[in-house]
Image (cartoon, rainbow, N blue to C red):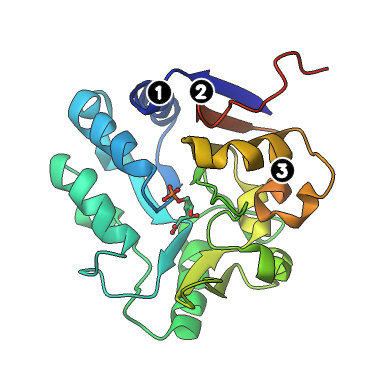
């Protein structure tokens, strides 16, 4: 586990963008699953505005680790957020964007998306393998849309599951833990003081942290990197053993 800690969100965005450019440049077609929520906004802005000429976007295929079951025009949509902060600023072929259809029936869409991943991605032991999965983490330790109250979804047989937000009841389609841990590389993007307690719990595996889905992220590849700002890293042990 590689912890990369930077001064603020802007620095996290710049450093992640440099990392992303290197990852894409290293190979041919690049299949990446994006995270949603608010953290990626500044990262996508910086990537699009300062690094877009350094990426051959024709090589990059975009997927999502999770999507809210809302139309793509809804302010809650991770796809809509990504259009606003990234796709509207770069030249990426429309056929390279594989959104989760939030407007469809959740169970039907989870099955469709799982099949799409099987068709589009290489498989390792029958599990679709992304080149990179970008994850966020909620204040409650959820990641993608696997929440603590439904942590059993992590080990679901199906590559994609239907989850329920614990407060709003909003339905989500999410990839499961097997797909996350099959990725060639997983990068957490976590910023802000509200995440500090769970960042410590999850990265230092403190007592009880196994209740947090983010603590189950452990890619078989061994390639797990955390991009943190100082606020999110504030409770980490300065001299890890
Ligand atoms: C989503 C995300 C989710 C997110 C965390 C952190 O659809 O909301 O994929 O897993 O990464 O909830 O969200 P913030 O970046 O808004 O704190």
Q: CA distance from mark 2 to mark 3?
A: 23 Å
Task: Give the x, y percent position of residue 202.
Answer: 70, 41
Helix, strand or loop at label 1? It is loop
In the image: residue 77, left or right of residue 136:
left
Q: Residue at x 60, y 39 (%)?
A: 184
Q: Nearer the viewer, residue 22 or 215?
A: 215
- The tag earlier along the polypeptide, 2 or 1, is 1
Task: Give the x, y percent position of residue 147.
Answer: 61, 63
Label 2: which residue? Answer: 230
Q: Nearer the viewer, residue 85 or 182?
A: 85
Disc 3: CA contacts within 10 A as few (<14), some (14-19) or many (>=20): some
Q: CA distance from mark 2 to mark 1?
A: 6 Å
Asked if labels 1 and 2 touch by Cβ distance under 8 angstroms, the answer is yes
Nearer mark to the viewer, of 3 and 1: 1
Disc 1: CA contacts within 10 A as few (<14), some (14-19) or many (>=20): some
Q: CA distance from mark 3 to mark 1?
A: 26 Å
Q: Residue at x 52, y 65 (%)?
A: 174
Task: Give the x, y percent position of residue 2.
Answer: 64, 24
Q: Quadrant of the C terminus?
A: top right
Image quadrant in which you'd find residue 25: top left
Q: Residue at x 25, y 69 (%)?
A: 72
Q: Residue at x 60, y 56 (%)?
A: 142
Q: Quadrant of the N terminus?
A: top right
Label 3: which residue? Answer: 218
In the image: residue 122, left or right of residue 221:
left
- The tag earlier along the polypeptide, 2 or 3, is 3
Asked if labels 3 and 2 touch by Cβ distance under 8 angstroms, the answer is no
Label 1: which residue? Answer: 8
């Amino acid at each position: 586990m590689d912890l990369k800690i930077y001064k603020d969100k802007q620095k996290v965005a710049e450093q992640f963008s440099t990392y992303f450019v290197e990852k894409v440049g290293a190979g041919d077609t690049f299949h990446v699953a994006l995270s949603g929520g608010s953290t990626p906004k500044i990262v996508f802005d910086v990537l699009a505005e300062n690094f877009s000429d350094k990426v051959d976007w024709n090589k990059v295929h975009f997927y999502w680790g999770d999507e809210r079951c809302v139309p793509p025009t809804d302010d809650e949509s991770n796809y809509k957020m990504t259009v606003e902060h990234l796709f509207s600023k770069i030249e990426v072929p429309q056929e390279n964007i594989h959104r989760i259809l939030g407007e469809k029936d959740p169970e039907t869409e989870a099955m469709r998306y799982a099949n799409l991943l099987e068709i589009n991605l290489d498989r390792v032991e029958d599990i679709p393998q992304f080149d990179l999965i970008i994850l966020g983490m909620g204040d409650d330790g959820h990641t993608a849309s696997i929440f603590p109250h439904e942590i059993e979804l992590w080990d679901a047989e199906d590559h994609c599951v239907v989850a329920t937000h614990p407060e709003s009841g909003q339905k989500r389609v999410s990839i499961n833990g097997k797909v996350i841990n099959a990725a060639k590389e997983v990068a957490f993007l976590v910023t802000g003081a509200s995440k500090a307690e769970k960042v410590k719990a999850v990265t230092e595996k403190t007592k009880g942290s196994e209740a947090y889905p983010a603590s189950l992220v452990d890619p078989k590849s061994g390639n797990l990197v955390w991009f943190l700002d100082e606020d999110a890293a504030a409770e980490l042990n300065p001299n890890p053993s």
